């Protein structure tokens, strides 16, 4: 473990006072050119003074983790937030599989920066996982959800309590620009360092400072914008604002990915000292949120009053409208109870002791949230759609309610299980070399050229003349005519060319996995696959509000 202490505060103060005095003299007596020197020197000293961690700890083994995590938890007792960021080795070849996270950075409100070298440790220690899972400790940074997802993919982990500074500041800028706007600090974000080898045998001093400053600046921006601290001469002072007050005001942007159109560009003026946080509006493009309660909890009774199932009100009313049922006194707190006037084809259990007959709450089964609900199939539909009919017919046991936040977390951790199944079952996931469609690159080039040249005149006029000639030649060659003979009809036909066709040899990942379990895991191969996904959900999401009688071993 390497620790770098930064205790030369008095030296910084003396240097800064001297610099301000000398630069101020040049400002008043040296003219406009020297005033630029004044501003530059003041900015340089402010940056140096602000970006000083109380200590930087580089952790390279499991034994060192416990002590460092204790320090982090101790310094987060009152103000429960940490700066959060990750680094990994960038790919040199386009399309190559992402390298795992090599460095995890955490910074406390007191200025301690801990750099966990995961490539050296070999895994993510449980002590660190406890901090990352704790939703009461906010993880502050830019694109925190993306970093959390990467950690989740690498280590089967759900990071909770992520807060994106762009949502807090309502500004789509990166960390360096936010630091300049909010703190007046100029960060050194050199690509040579950001894209360097983070899995090297030893981190250079530049890499260490770069990694520490990223998380340190995040904590400083957060504390200033929320009003936890304020700047005075050569000092950052704690205000009287309580942590509870700050945490409550930020609740609506925790574990939320900010929508780009809801943010403003750094070119627009911002007022970081009095920020307007985003209204609670989560991105729902990929996940349709239920507008009404998902469960109506209407009860269906058999003619002998046995509870058959709970159902939606629309289904109960259909039975009534067709004179196939009658309304009876409600049972088990149902919103509506109807008794069938005919003998049903199938009964799932006796005296209502079956999953489908139980009343279910309209809350997220993981965290209990009462809003932003989606239906989530715990056994993904890409597998279920290939199950035998008897296995998938009317089977809602594995369809549960999740809030958007938990749904996004579950999607990120399910990626690892899909990859494991892909390897185990020789069932590749869709990729450039394994796709349901084949693409003709020459036709694709013709279509792209046609689309570029059939856009509005304003757009075409912006294309360099040489490029226009090149695009016209591509189209002319395809149709076997000279460039001079090209017509508007040729351009239109080129823009509408279909460059893809179905791949007859393609078999989907889900189909191959189901076939593997049916043939190699017999008997009950499908049931084993269901159990695998259910146990994975329980282990990694730890749901606290599952419906009564929900079970890993459910087979009805």
Image (spheres, grey):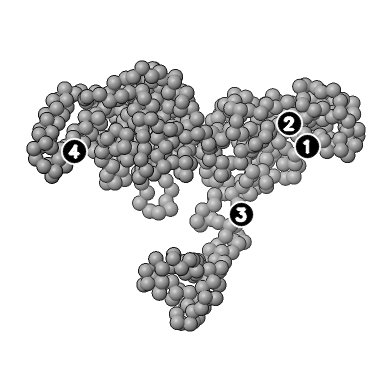
Exactly how many numbered labels are in the figure? Answer: 4
The quadrant holding residue 189 is top left
Drawn side of residue 402 relative to residue 55, left or right: right
Q: Nearer the viewer, residue 212 or 238?
A: 238
The Cα–Cα distance between marks 2 and 1, rounded to whole angstroms, is 9 Å
Residue 129: x, y in percent?
Answer: 44, 27
Q: Which residue is drawn at 25% across and 30% down?
A: 50
Q: Is mark 3 on a helix, strand or loop?
A: loop
Which badge, 3 or 1, is on the more N-terminal residue?
A: 1
The Cα–Cα distance between marks 3 and 1, rounded to whole angstroms, is 38 Å
10 Å crowding of disc 4: few (<14), some (14-19), many (20+): some
Q: Are marks 2 and 1 in contact (CB under 8 Å)?
A: yes
The Cα–Cα distance between marks 2 and 3, rounded to whole angstroms, is 39 Å
Residue 309: x, y in percent?
Answer: 78, 30
- On residue 507, the disc is 3
In the rendered view of the protein, which quadrant contains the C terminus? top right
Q: What element carries label 4?
A: helix
| Pair 3/1: label in front | 1
Which residue, given by chain and number where applicable, does mark 2 sit on? 296
Q: What element carries label 2?
A: loop
Which badge, 4 or 1, is on the more N-terminal residue?
A: 4
In the rendered view of the protein, which quadrant contains the N terminus? top left
Which residue, given by chain and number where applicable, does mark 4 sit on? 39
Which badge, 4 or 2, is on the more N-terminal residue?
A: 4
Which badge, 2 or 3, is on the more N-terminal residue?
A: 2
Residue 320: x, y in percent?
Answer: 86, 35
Q: Residue at x 90, y 36 (%)?
A: 323
Drawn side of residue 481 relative to residue 273, left or right: right
Q: Residue at x 41, y 42 (%)?
A: 264
Q: Are marks 3 and 4 in contact (CB under 8 Å)?
A: no
């Amino acid at each position: 473990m390497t620790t770098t202490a930064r205790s030369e505060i008095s030296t910084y103060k003396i240097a800064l006072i001297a610099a301000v005095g000398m630069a101020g003299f040049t400002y008043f007596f040296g003219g406009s050119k020297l005033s630029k020197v004044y501003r530059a020197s003041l900015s340089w000293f402010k940056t140096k003074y602000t970006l000083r961690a109380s200590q930087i700890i580089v952790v390279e083994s499991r034994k060192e983790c416990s002590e460092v995590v204790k320090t982090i938890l101790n310094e987060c007792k009152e103000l429960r937030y940490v700066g959060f960021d990750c680094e990994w080795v960038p790919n040199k070849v386009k399309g190559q599989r992402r390298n795992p996270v090599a460095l995890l950075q955490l910074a406390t409100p007191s200025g301690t920066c801990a750099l966990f070298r995961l490539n050296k440790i070999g895994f993510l220690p449980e002590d660190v996982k406890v901090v990352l899972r704790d939703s009461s400790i906010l993880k502050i940074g830019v694109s925190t959800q993306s970093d959390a997802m990467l950690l989740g993919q690498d280590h089967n982990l759900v990071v909770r309590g992520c807060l994106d500074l762009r949502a807090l500041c309502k500004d789509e800028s990166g960390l360096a620009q936010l630091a300049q706007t909010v703190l007046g600090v100029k960060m050194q974000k050199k690509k040579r360092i950001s894209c360097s080898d983070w899995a090297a045998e030893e981190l250079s001093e530049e890499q260490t400072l770069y990694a520490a400053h990223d998380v340190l600046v995040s904590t400083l921006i957060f504390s200033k914008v929320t009003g936890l601290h304020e700047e005075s001469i050569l000092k950052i002072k704690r205000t009287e604002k309580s942590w509870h007050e700050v945490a409550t005001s930020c609740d609506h942007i925790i574990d939320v990915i900010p929508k780009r159109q809801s943010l403003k560009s750094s070119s627009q003026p911002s007022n970081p000292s009095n920020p307007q946080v985003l209204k609670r509006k989560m991105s729902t493009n990929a996940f349709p949120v239920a507008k009404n309660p998902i469960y109506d909890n209407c009860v269906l009774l058999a003619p002998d009053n046995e509870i058959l199932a709970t159902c939606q009100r629309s289904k109960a009313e259909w039975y009534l409208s067709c004179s196939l049922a009658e309304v009876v006194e409600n049972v088990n707190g149902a919103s509506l109870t109807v008794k069938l006037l005919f003998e049903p084809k199938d009964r799932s259990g006796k005296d209502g002791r079956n999953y489908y007959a139980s009343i279910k709450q309209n809350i997220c089964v993981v965290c209990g949230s009462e809003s932003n609900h989606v239906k989530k199939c715990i056994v993904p539909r890409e597998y279920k759609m290939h199950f035998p009919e008897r296995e998938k017919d009317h089977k809602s046991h594995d369809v549960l309610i999740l809030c958007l936040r938990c749904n996004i977390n579950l999607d990120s951790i399910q990626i690892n299980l899909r990859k494991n199944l892909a390897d185990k079952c020789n069932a590749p996931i869709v990729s450039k070399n394994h796709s349901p469609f084949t693409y003709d690159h020459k036709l694709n080039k013709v279509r792209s050229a046609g689309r570029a040249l059939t856009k509005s005149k304003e757009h075409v006029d912006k294309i360099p003349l040489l490029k226009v000639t090149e695009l016209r030649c591509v189209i002319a060659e395809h149709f076997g005519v000279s460039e001079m003979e090209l017509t508007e009809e040729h351009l239109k036909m080129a823009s509408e060319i279909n460059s893809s066709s179905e791949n007859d040899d393609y078999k989907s990942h889900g189909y191959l996995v189901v076939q593997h379990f049916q043939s190699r895991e017999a008997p009950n191969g499908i049931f084993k696959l269901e159990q695998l996904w259910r146990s994975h959900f329980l282990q990694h999401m730890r749901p606290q509000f599952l419906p009564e009688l929900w079970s890993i071993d459910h087979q009805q």
